[in-house]
Image (cartoon, rainbow, N blue to C red):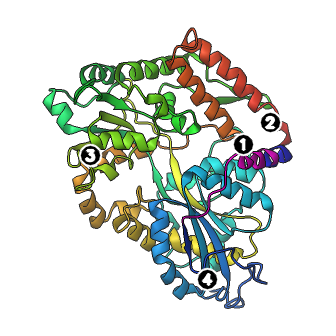
Amino acid sequence: MKNKLVKRILALTMTTAMAVGLLAGCGGGKAEETASTGEKKSSEASGEFDWKAYEGTTIEIQMVQHTASEAMVNKLEEFEELTGIHVEYSITPESSYFDKVSTSLASGSGSPDLFMSGAYQLWDYSSAGYVEDLSTYLEDQSMVSPDYDYDDFVQSAVNALKWSGVPGEPVGTGQQLGLPLAFEVYTMAYNQKAFKDNGLEVPKTYDELLTVCDKLQNWNGDNSYAVAVRGARDWGTIHPAYMSMFSAFGAKDFEIEGDKLVSKVNSPEAVEMTEFFVDMIKRGGSSSWSKYTWYDCGVDLGTGNTAMVLDADNNPVHQNWEGASEEAGNIAYAPLPVAKEGDPQISNYWTWSVAMNSASKNKGAAWYYIMYFTGKEFAKYATIEGNSLDPARTSVWESEEFKTMMEGQPGYIEAYEATIENTTILFTPQPYFFETTTEWAATLQDIVAGKYDSAQDGLDQLKEKMDKAVSDIDLSQY
């Protein structure tokens, strides 16, 4: 299966034009490979931690265009002064970023040493053998700064980046494939003025949400609508609100039967949830829903085109800073609706992390980079000064600076606190995630468009396609 995965990753990258990094830092270009293979250059005998242990080493990192990347670039000079490690980097828009990373990792050259990633991508990359297990470094006291404070991480964010490598086994155990820079959970943002002017309460249940959808269509003019959710024909449509609600209905994407993964996307729970979701889109969604991405949902809330967004909690924030959009100051936050009041809030997870190339020739220096830029001090800087949300460190959430910063985002912290306890990656880990979820998004679009006789019919056909996608996985071989 590994050979199949490698070929699939390479084939995927060949279909998309490679983008040149928008920014080049500290000299740019390919990082030079030093003679070091990750061995310490000082303090080797004492076993004590030393920030200068890899002085003189050059490492390379590939970053995605993100507030966390901007914050890292701003602190590179301080890191280089502290460690003596020279860092070369590139920043690439997300639309072409993972193609670039996939090609680089598949080359086996060891370049880049580090890369930013989400957890789903790490399932693909680790299945192909491209990702270093960071547990080795975390468990070596001589490699960990005394003030690193691993226990300060939001533990569910760390656990979301652990996986055994066995398809079907949930995240939370096994290799530490990356460490988190920032993450997002899925909540509801809404226009307070829209609700006040129409005498409506913020919906807490699915039934209430549908009622509000009926009453808020055209609430702000002919092109305005009630609720924005993602709808584009790619995996990004499934993983935020849809998957969070899918799991809240008790549905699952896959289950293990014998030595095989078997899709359950056509179960009674899955059909019921999808019928609800389609009804919500038809009664309250945008006429352009099938084109909607993260960006469109946020912008429509900021321009007053939509009254609600069910998406990443950090998405609408960028529309709500003072002067950021037409509706800045009118936006507030609440947990996602549930079946009935009192039901637990359930959310899927997305994490931006730093991971290490298993072929890196500078693993020690690369680990120092990860440690510095996932530490408490940097997390606070990235959040407070760089607006990089959500912070992966509990100490940042609890800081007075963060609480003051978020005073203009009413309900944000409360929605997070109501949701985080039951937040985890809700998908079944498996190396064909992108293939199966992209097909899922296409099916959802077609169900909304009426191309199937029913949601059951569409999901029955989706099950067959998903079962075929994972058919080569034989769990007896793990």
Q: Name the front one of labels 4 and 2.
A: 4
Up/down of 472 relative to 108, above or below? above
- Callout 1: helix, strand or loop? loop
Q: Magenta segment: does it hold 81?
A: no
Horizontal and vertical percent position of residue 402: 30, 62
Left or right: 96 as drawn, with respect to 39: left
Query: Residue visible at 48% across and 25% down?
Result: 249
- What amino acid is found at the position of numbered circle 4 in the picture? His
Residue placed under numbered mark 4 in the picture: 86
Q: Are marks 1 and 2 in contact (CB under 8 Å)?
A: yes
Disc 4 versus disc 2: distance between alpha carbons? 42 Å
User: In x, y percent, where is residue 220?
Assistant: 22, 30
| Residue 130 visible in the snapshot | no
User: Dot 2: what SS?
Assistant: loop
Tell whether position 18 is magenta: yes
Tag 2 and tag 3, C-beta contact below 8 Å: no
Q: CA distance from mark 1 to mark 2?
A: 9 Å
Residue neighbourhood size for the residue with mark 1, other residues' Cα within 10 Å, grouped as few (<14), some (14–19), many (≥20): many
Residue type marked 2: Ile
Kindly report which numbered mark, 1 or 4, lies closer to the viewer in this rendering.
4
| Numbered range of the magenta stretch | 7-22
Q: Secondary structure at mark 4?
A: strand
**Residue annotated with mark 3:** 411
**Disc on res. 431:** 1
In the visual, does 426 lie left or right of 309? Answer: right
Left or right: 402 in relation to 15: left
Numbered circle sitting on residue 473: 2
